[in-house]
Image (spheres, helix red, strand yellow):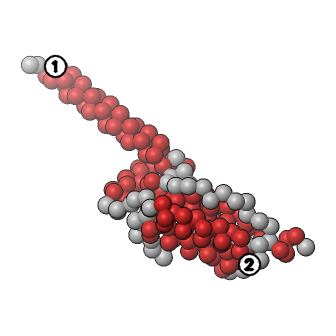
Amino acid sequence: MNTVSLIILVVAIAGIAIAALWYVQKRRSQHLQTRFGREYDHAVEQFGDQRKAETELERREKRVERFAIHGIPKEERDRFAEAWRVDQARFVDEPQKAVTEAHRLVDELMKACGYPVSSEFESNAADLSVRHASVVEHYRIACDIAARQEKGQANTEDLRTAMVHYRALFEELLGTSVQQTVPEPQEARR
């Protein structure tokens, strides 16, 4: 084999390797974009780099695979649904307490489903994003409002919005609707 043939062979092998690497990376990105939806974009924005974000999303997938995530029995679903309805009714007279309780109920339901709920919001959101990417944004918005509420920076409409977002996540985790409109608080009706 002469030198020119050898160079052509090396260039061809390098070209095939680069094309294969590009194809694998493209498939990886497509998989993660499909699986995580808007959470993919959130991760890219958060990390400022597509590869770093994709590495983090894959790390989340692997971590969550180790959890024993499961549905809950009908009796427990019914208990959670009733607790939600009671809390939602509380919103009329005590919107701040209702939002605090909604957050607690979501955490309790996450634990009942097998999520290792921590006090760190981002960790909880990351874990949720693997199986509930379509509703994790609801969690982010509701928790942001709840945090502003603790600082006295959330008005009643913000609190109503938080309840709506908590409900979307709650229903997704519960696997059933607890649909009931969030009532107007007493102060808003006066």
- Asked whether disc 2 touches disc 1, contact meaning CB atoms under 8 Å apart, the reply is no
When asked about the image quadrant of residue 156, the answer is: bottom right
Q: Residue at x 71, y 74 (%)?
A: 90
Q: Quadrant of the C terminus?
A: bottom right
Against 190, is 138 above or below?
A: above
Residue at 57% of width from left, 62% of height from top?
A: 170
Q: Residue 23: percent from the left, percent from the top?
A: 35, 34
**Circle 1 SS class:** helix
Q: Amino acid at mark 1?
A: Ser
Q: Residue furthest left?
A: 1
Q: Which residue is mark 2?
A: 94
Residue drawn at (44%, 68%) of the image? 112
The relative height of residue 99 versus residue 74 in the rendered view (above or below) is below
Mark sitting earlier along the chain (2/1) = 1
Q: Can residue 150 be seen from the camera position used here? A: yes
Mark 2, other Cα within 10 Å: few <14 / some 14–19 / many ≥20: some
Badge 1: residue crowd in 10 Å (few <14, some 14–19, many ≥20): few
Q: Nearer the viewer, residue 13 or 62?
A: 62
Q: Position of residue 43 (x, y in %)?
A: 49, 55
The tag on residue 150 is none
**Secondary structure of residue under mark 2:** loop
Q: Quadrant of residue 66?
A: bottom left
Among the 4 quarters of the image, the one containing residue 7: top left
Name which residue lies at 32% across and 31% down.
19
Res. 5 mark: 1
How far across and down, in percent of the image, does residue 8 sit?
A: 21, 22
x and y percentages locating residue 67 in the rendered image? 35, 62
Question: What amino acid does circle 2 point to?
Answer: Glu
Point out the frontmost of discs 2 and 1: 2
Real-space Cα distance between discs 2 and 1? 81 Å
Q: How many marks?
A: 2
